Image: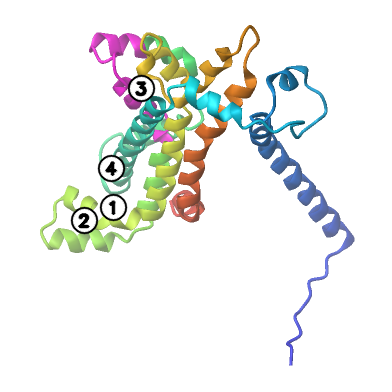
Amino acid sequence: MAKNRAQIVYSPQQKTIRGLLWLLLVFMTLVVIFPVAYVILGSFKENQELLLGGSNVFPQKWIIQNYIDAWEQANFAVYTKNSLILSLGVMVLSLIISTMAGYVFSRKNFWGKEIIYGIFTAFMFINVGSVSLRPLYELAVGVNIHTSLWPVVLFSAGGGQATYIFLCRGYVNSVPRELDEAARIDGCTFFQTYYQIILPMLKPVLATIAILSFRQGWNEYIMPRVFTMTNDNLRPLTVGVNMLKNAGDGAAAWNIMFAGATIAIIPILVVFICFSRYFMGGLTAGAVKG
């Protein structure tokens, strides 16, 4: 016999609130999806159709040649390699720095600890943006590393550290201190405890930081644009794809640029799909357990 399931009865006011929440969620979903869908559908259109606008969402004629032209006119092999170097470099540095700093802020007691941590967390809400580009570029020139991607990797890796350290510290706070004490009794140093005991337990938050930092490096545009102005072979995909806009004769080739942008979206989607099940768990655990 089928078991009778208790049904939740909502009052008219609760039904109205739920309906409004659903409408809000649908609206926000459309706002997020529309730009991506517009670029993907636009990549199959003729450039004239994009320039004239119109009410047609779908292409009047589906043109695959846009992708072939984008691949041939842009040095996608080199640009993809540069984007991978930039994204993986930012990801690795972010993982190392944030986990170490989060562990120290959670386990070590030293003078000014709360003040320093407060400054770090304050920078979660402060973004100096392009104001810092000139001094950063002059710093790179001063140490003679401006002719490579290393300054972009180093400076980009520092961009999201406040958020990553916040997540790591919160997650480490949830790990029982008895594990540290047991490791210390067994002869582990402070670093060995971090590397052998704490780090393996941070897998959910590590996956979250890996996704966020990889996306940050992959989507970086302004800084790579400034640092690669004199060297086309150092450009990542975000900069190279934007240059496709000038591939047309006279008019901006938006169809070619949209096709290149669609190709550039694929790797970051693959990374997110592979790690998405860890993403929300690590984000919630790091934010709540602290």
Circles 2 and 1 in contact, beta carbons < 8 Å: yes
Callout 2–callout 4 Cβ contact below 8 Å: no
The residue under label 1 is: 199
The CA distance from mark 2 to mark 1 is 6 Å
Q: Residue at x 27, y 36 (%)?
A: 111
Badge 3 density bin: few <14, some 14–19, many ≥20, Cα 10 Å: many
**From mark 4 to mark 3, how far is it between C-alphas?**
22 Å
Instruction: Residue under label 4, please give it.
Output: 100
Mark 3 or mark 2: whose residue is earlier in sequence: 3
**Which is nearer the N-term, disc 4 or disc 3?**
4
User: x%, y% of residue 192?
Assistant: 17, 52
Disc 4 and disc 3 in contact, CB within 8 angstroms: no
Residue 55 locus on image (x, y percent): 83, 28
* Horizontal arrangement in the rendering, residue 10 relative to residue 89 (left or right): right
Q: Residue at x 70, y 43 (%)?
A: 29
Q: Nearer the viewer, residue 37 or 94?
A: 37
Is residue 197 at all visible to an observer of this figure?
yes
> Mark 3 — residue?
152
Magenta segment: does it hold 161?
yes
Disc 2 crowd rating (10 Å Cα; few below 14, some 14-19, many 20+) is: few
The span picked out in magenta is 136-162
Q: Does the residue at mark 4 contact the one at mark 1 (Cβ under 8 Å)?
A: no
Which mark sits nearer the N-terminus, 4 or 1? Answer: 4
